[in-house]
């Protein structure tokens, strides 16, 4: 009996517009593993790159959420400017997050997805649940940027040694350059310079 005969002999499933709810499936790839894809890199190189990228990814996701929190909680005379800047930086972090996650997938890995998993892995300290003074919020952002940048610089150098030019490029061209620029913009708001001289 051919496959077509087998299909025709089976009872057809009744058609319905009802969604199949509460489905569960097997975990087909575990976090921390890489599958073989034809990308011209060794298993060890891909595994290492995915581990380093997932660390950066977790820190970027926390940084993004800090920007959103500070966007909502900003106050004082520079509220409007900082409110807009926080949102702009959060959007740029969203783009970086997607780029890094897709690089993990390109290498055959599993990008960290669940925010509870992110919280377990990140190197960025948890801020208070409430509202800090504006300079403290900005300082906290700068510390988070530095954490991201230190990790990205080290990871970029190491993956380059393993021949992973694509990951090196993502880390240098996207993560490092964007975070350096954002850190500069935030840091300048902490310079105590009067608007006019008396």
Image (cartoon, rainbow, N blue to C red):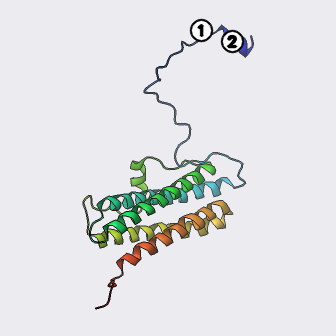
Q: Which residue is mark 2?
A: 6
Write the residue at 39% across / 63% down.
84
Quarter in which the C terminus is drawn: bottom left
Write the residue at 45% across / 75% down.
184
Q: Which is nearer the eye, 152 or 158?
A: 152
- Tell me the crowding category of disc 1: few under 14, some 14 to 19, or many 20 or more residues within 10 angstroms, Cα based: few
Question: Which residue reaches farthest right?
Answer: 2
Q: Position of residue 136 (x, y in %)?
A: 30, 71
Mark 1 secondary-structure assignment: loop
- Tell me the crowding category of disc 2: few under 14, some 14 to 19, or many 20 or more residues within 10 angstroms, Cα based: few
Q: Position of residue 100 (x, y in %)?
A: 55, 56
Write the residue at 75% across / 13% down.
2
Q: Which is nearer the eye, 42 or 108?
A: 108
Q: How many marks?
A: 2
Decide if residue 76 is in sight here.
yes
Q: Position of residue 104 (x, y in %)?
A: 58, 52
Q: Quadrant of residue 28?
A: top right
Quarter in which the N terminus is drawn: top right
Q: Quadrant of residue 90?
A: bottom left
- Disc number lying in front (2 or 1): 1
Determine whether label 2 and label 1 are within 8 Å by CB: no
Write the residue at 60% across / 62% down.
170
Give the CA separation, mark 2 to mark 1: 10 Å
């Amino acid at each position: 009996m051919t496959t077509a005969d087998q299909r025709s002999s089976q009872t057809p499933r009744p058609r319905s517009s009802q969604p199949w709810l509460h489905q569960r499936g097997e975990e087909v790839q575990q976090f921390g593993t890489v599958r073989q894809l034809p990308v011209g890199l060794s298993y060890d190189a891909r595994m290492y790159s995915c581990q380093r990228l997932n660390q950066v990814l977790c820190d970027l996701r926390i940084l993004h959420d800090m920007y959103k929190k500070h966007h909502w909680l900003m106050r004082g005379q520079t509220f409007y400017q900082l409110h807009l800047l926080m949102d702009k930086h959060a959007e740029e972090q969203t783009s970086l997050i997607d780029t890094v996650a897709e690089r993990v997938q390109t290498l055959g890995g599993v990008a960290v997805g669940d925010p509870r998993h992110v919280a377990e892995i990140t190197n960025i300290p948890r801020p208070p649940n409430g509202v800090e003074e504006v300079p403290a919020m900005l300082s906290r952002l700068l510390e988070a940027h530095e954490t991201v940048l230190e990790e990205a610089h080290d990871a970029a150098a190491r993956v380059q040694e393993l021949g992973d030019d694509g990951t090196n490029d993502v880390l240098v061209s996207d993560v490092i350059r964007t975070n350096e620029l954002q850190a500069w913009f935030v840091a300048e708001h902490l310079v105590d310079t009067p608007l006019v001289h008396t």
